[in-house]
Image (cartoon, rainbow, N blue to C red):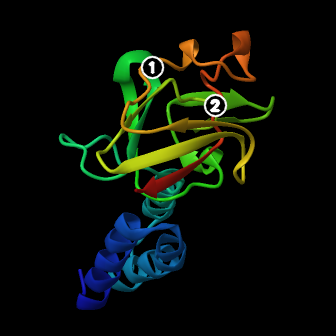
């Protein structure tokens, strides 16, 4: 493989780690590099390169980091009660949890999305922090405040959603350092 092809492969791999825009930009260069490096770059290899690019792009939805071993900043949201199930560590405001890949599936008939929207059942809060979870995006609708006392089960917290609780109800989050 030529030096040019190797550099484009590195750019594509780095792009895959850093974000979608770089991968979109790098993939044509990657395919072109392979063509230049090997005159016999056939359709199978082209299709394989394109398929690989599509797989990389599928993971481009924003995601949140999981719960740290020791919570010292922000909050951790959990899909299930009692701090169980998939988790996400949040240290800054999120205007719309639907924009972040999460464990809850939602179908609109044509496609299925996985996000954290309406998916929070318990919350842990780091010492010196507090948070407000909102029913709707952009910090609107019913609000549930949580401080260092944590919330082990939103099924026991009154709210506007299923069974008059706040379980699986949050669509945006504000975090505050006291």
Compared to 21, does 66 lie above or below?
A: above
Residue at 42% x, 77% y is 30
Tell me where residue 72 appears, x and y as whole percent.
Answer: 24, 50
Q: At numbered mark 2, what does the secondary structure look like: helix, strand or loop? A: loop
Q: Is residue 141 above or below residue 23?
A: above
Q: In the rendered image, which residue does mark 1 sit on?
A: 80
Residue 25 x/y as whole percent: 52, 79
Q: Quadrant of residue 135?
A: top right
Spatial distance from mark 2 to mark 1, Cα to Cα? 12 Å
User: Disc 2 marks which residue?
Assistant: 118
Which of the image's four quarters has the C terminus? bottom left
27 on left or right of 178: right
Q: Is residue 17 above or below residue 125?
A: below
Q: Position of residue 7 (x, y in %)?
A: 28, 85
Q: Position of residue 139 (x, y in %)?
A: 69, 51
Name which residue lies at 63% across and 23% down: 166
Instruction: State the residue at coordinates (55%, 48%).
Output: 100
């Amino acid at each position: 493989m030529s030096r040019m092809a190797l550099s484009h492969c590195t750019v594509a791999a780095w792009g895959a780690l850093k974000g979608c825009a770089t991968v979109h930009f790098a993939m044509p260069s990657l395919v072109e590099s392979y063509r230049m490096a090997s005159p016999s770059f056939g359709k199978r290899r082209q299709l394989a390169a394109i398929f690989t690019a599509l797989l990389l792009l599928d993971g481009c939805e924003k995601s949140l980091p999981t719960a740290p071993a020791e919570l010292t900043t922000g909050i951790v949201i959990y899909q299930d009660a009692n701090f169980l199930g998939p988790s996400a560590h949040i240290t800054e405001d999120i205007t719309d949890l639907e924009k972040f890949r999460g464990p809850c599936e939602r179908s609109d008939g044509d496609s299925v999305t996985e996000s954290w929207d309406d998916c929070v059942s318990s919350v842990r809060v780091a010492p010196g922090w507090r948070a407000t979870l909102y029913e709707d995006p952009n910090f609107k609708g019913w609000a549930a405040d949580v401080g260092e006392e944590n919330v082990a089960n939103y099924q026991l917290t009154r709210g506007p959603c299923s069974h008059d609780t706040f379980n699986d109800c949050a669509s945006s989050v504000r975090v505050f350092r006291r």
